[in-house]
Amino acid sequence: MNKLLRAAAIQFNIELGYIDANLDQAIAALRRVSSQGAKLAVLPEMWSCGYDYRNLTELAKETPRVLKEIQTECRKLGLVTVGSLPELENGSIYNTAYIIDNGEQVDSYRKLHLFSTMREDQFLGPGNRSLVVKTSLGRLGIAICYDLRFPELFRKLALEGAEIICLPAEWPKPRQEHWKTLLRARAIENQVFVVAANCCRVQGKLDFFGLSQLVSPLGNILAIAGEEDTELVADFDFTEMEKYRAQINILADRRADIYGTP
């Protein structure tokens, strides 16, 4: 793994149910961050269509086509890309993050924690495994939106070797302070980089605040968005991460004999 990596979080207003419009936005943004030297790009949660529950089954049928186009683009650009889409399998729909490495789908992760407040559990099936995936850029841990509130998942990803945690999200107002605090906490307590890509502006009846972030293992905010469409780009220094881990060896100092493992 290179000691320096340029990463990007892509934030845009998802047009509810309009796959082609969202796909055009995503591809244009991937091209822009690539032109700035980014090698890792994270897209928002359900970025192709949003939570259009009434039409989700039909929208999920389009995901293979969407993936194919993103794979083609990432192959051209030499990008590793993470973003979540609706996945249809055996009559069930999942909120699934796909990891594309230079055009190849290397793995996928189904959202573990479904946000019952927004009725996700009524329309979506839950995942059944965590994921740390080896890519050409290093080991990525994957989580989606509401997963952020469950620190045991992030600790498990760190213990399994994650160096960067990628978090696609649709996190709405008025809980932006929770978002900002939890992103820094997850980075600090696990000594990992975090790339969090949120959507922004109004989608259906919800208003999203954006505030996508790139956070260092020390909890430094390397880049933070406002509330409008944008792309964030920042450099990750893995030498700094390794130095910090050597100084304060959190994972080695754990008392698993007392409180167990995640």
Image (spheres, rainbow, N blue to C red):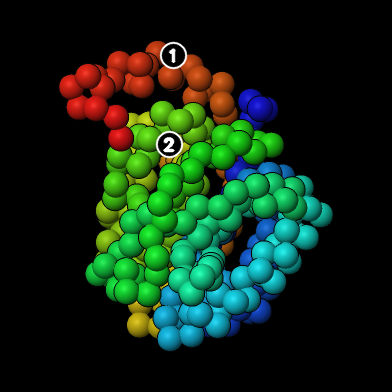
Which residue extends farthest top? 247
Residue sitting nearer the eye, 82 or 90 = 90
Q: Mark 1 points at which residue?
A: 246
Tell me the amino acid under the disc marked 2: Leu
Q: Please count the marks in the image.
A: 2
Q: In which quarter of the image is the C terminus?
A: top left
At 33% from the left edge and 62% from the top edge, which residue is drawn? 114
Q: Residue placed at 33% from the left, 31% from the top? A: 189
Residue 184, how many percent across, how many down?
Answer: 35, 41
Name the residue beneath numbered marker 2.
157
Q: Label 1, secondary structure: give it.
A: helix
- Residue extending furthest toward the left: 258
Tag 2–tag 1 contact (CB < 8 Å): no
Q: In the rendering, at what x and y percent does residue 251 appear? A: 36, 21
Q: In this view, does 16 lie above or below 117?
A: below
Distance between the alpha carbons at the discs numbered 2 and 1: 19 Å
Residue 25 got which mark?
none
Q: What residue type is labelled 1?
A: Ala
